[in-house]
Amino acid sequence: FQVCNAGRATRYLMTLKVKEWLKLENVQVERLEKMPVENRPALRPPFAAMSTLHYETFFETKLRPWEESLKEYIDGMA
């Protein structure tokens, strides 16, 4: 299995959450438009969120939300 936490987030949304939790009021976060990356010819799908459905069904359990796990990690860094 490939496992991730429950829920969906873009890198932009994750960055905004980290900024909020670290109280980085003076840090500006800008969303970048999608653009081709040089020297990376692989096609990227427009939406590529991982699903926890197979894991949760197989093990009959629910995974916690990504926000909860990321917050715990950030709090543990202090």
Image: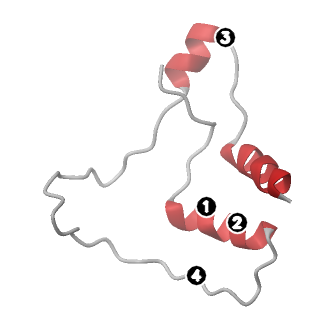
Query: Mark 3 touching mark 4, by CB under 8 A?
Result: no
Instruction: Kindly state the secondary structure of the residue where label 1 is placed.
Output: helix
- Identify the residue position indicated by label 3 in the image: 60
Query: Mark 1 touching mark 2, by CB under 8 A?
Result: yes
Mark 1 or mark 3: which is in front?
1
Report crowding for label 3: few under 14, some 14 to 19, many 20 or more residues within 10 A (C-alpha). Answer: few
Q: Is residue 49 left or right of residue 43?
A: right
Instruction: Kindly state the secondary structure of the residue where label 3 is placed.
Output: loop
Looking at the image, residue 4 lies above or below residue 40: above
Instruction: Kindly state the secondary structure of the residue where label 4 is placed.
Output: loop
Q: Position of residue 26 (x, y in %)?
A: 73, 90
Q: Quadrant of residue 32?
A: bottom left
Inter-mark Cα distance, 3 to 2 = 31 Å
Inter-mark Cα distance, 1 to 2 = 6 Å
* Mark earlier in primary sequence (3, 2): 2
Q: Which mark is residue 14?
A: 1
Q: Is residue 3 left or right of residue 75?
A: left
- Identify the residue position indicated by label 2 in the image: 18
Seen from this angle, which residue lies furthest bottom?
26
Q: Is residue 72 left or right of residue 56?
A: right
- Identify the residue position indicated by label 4 in the image: 29
Quadrant for the C terminus, please. Answer: bottom right
Looking at the image, residue 46 lies above or below residue 31: above
Amino acid type at circle 4 is Val
